[in-house]
Amino acid sequence: MDLTHWTTSRRVWIDEIFDKLLPVRSAGNDPGRLVESMRYSLLAPGKRLRPLLALAAAEAVGLDTARVTDQGHPNAHEPLVIAAAAVELVHCYSLIHDDLPAMDDDDWRRGNPSNHKVFGEATAILAGDALLTLAFEWLAEAGDRTGRPQDFCRAMLALARGAGVNGMVRGQARDLGEAPPEGFADLEELHDEKTAALFRAAAEVGAAAAGGSATQIAAVGSFGQKFGVAFQHADDREDGDHARHADRVRDRVPALLAEAVGALDALANPDRGATLRALSDQLLIKVVGAPTEY
């Protein structure tokens, strides 16, 4: 498949949802600076990997998005794209808060000054809070539009679990601990919580919003979890973080991705996971230079 076309077209689709639904500053809009802060971080250039994963998971459970996307208008499937975009809201909130002096204390994000360096710490905190809550507002409203609120309730539950005290936030708390990870296993456990939990949630959100069964949601969720750990290992390797584990990463990433793709065997029609497999191959090429047979 042409993964470049797939990702490019769907990034446009996601960004159109942001343009349509994200608050804008207007005359008499008292929280205008807050809105600017939200838009500053959310609309910054990014991979949009988590919402893309949500859309790929929706395809894996049987929803054909190609027809709608090629027309350039979400139409009847717009609630699904809104659900995918909601995952990016949560990811963006986490980045804003991670960059704060009390957290990772980073002055730069995606080549631009971090949110708190532009708008101040207080506004940055509020912007993150607003993005987090807006994600669930979008999901609830999208569920009402479809007439399938139960599916979007499952999506909300998946996102809350992935982002919360047993997922991403737990990982961030672990990362803030005084002692760094002692070994590769500790590092992978950190990645499993801080990064992969939201990848799992993204896949589960997409599958649930598309009306997938419990078995299908669990299958793509397992893919997302393994893929997320592999992604973070690859990202660390590219950035030169944890350099002493570089050789382990090169061996571990293919194994993780094989486990991720293997989880898709539980789908009613595993062939529908082609986009997820293509995303896996893309990451594998980045780390070891060539795809593999799973």
Image (spheres, rainbow, N blue to C red):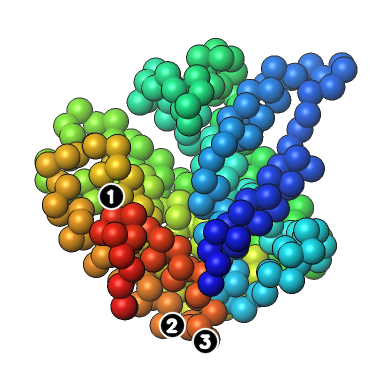
The numbered mark, 1 or 2, whose residue comes first in the sequence reads 1
Residue 163, given in percent of the width and then of the height, sits at 47, 47
The reply to whether residue 160 is visible in this rendering is no
Determine whether 174 is above or below 8 in the image: above
Going by the image, does 78 lie left or right of 58? right
- Report how far apart the C-alphas of labels 1 and 2 lie in the structure: 26 Å
Residue at 68 percent of width and 70 percent of height: 66
Is residue 53 positioned above or below 172 on the image? below
Kindly report the distance in space between the C-alpha atoms of the residues bearing marks 2 and 3: 6 Å
Residue 178, horizontal then vertical, whole percent: 20, 28
Q: Dividing the picture into quarters, in which one does residue 207 lie?
A: bottom right
Q: Secondary structure at mark 2?
A: helix
Query: What's the residue type where badge 2 is placed?
Result: Ala
What residue is disc 2 on? 266
Q: Position of residue 88 (x, y in %)?
A: 57, 45
**Crowding near the residue tagged with mark 2, few <14, some 14–19, many ≥20 C-alpha atoms within 10 Å:** some
Residue type beneath disc 1: His
Task: Find disc 3 in the rendering and name its residue.
Answer: 268
Q: Height in image: 237 above or below 71?
A: above
In the rendered view, tell whether residue 244 sits above or below residue 106: below
The answer to the question of whether label 2 and label 3 lie on touching residues, with beta carbons closer than 8 A, is: no
At label 3, which amino acid type do we have?
Answer: Ala
User: Alpha-carbon distance for marks 1 and 3?
Assistant: 30 Å
Q: Residue at x 30, y 42 (%)?
A: 238
Q: Give x and y (percent) for residue 17.
A: 73, 47
Answer whether residue 251 is visible to the viewer in this image: yes
Nearer to us: label 1 or label 2: 1
* Label 1 close to label 3 by CB (< 8 Å): no
| Outermost residue, bottom side | 268
Residue occupied by mark 1: 233
Q: Is residue 72 left or right of residue 92?
A: right
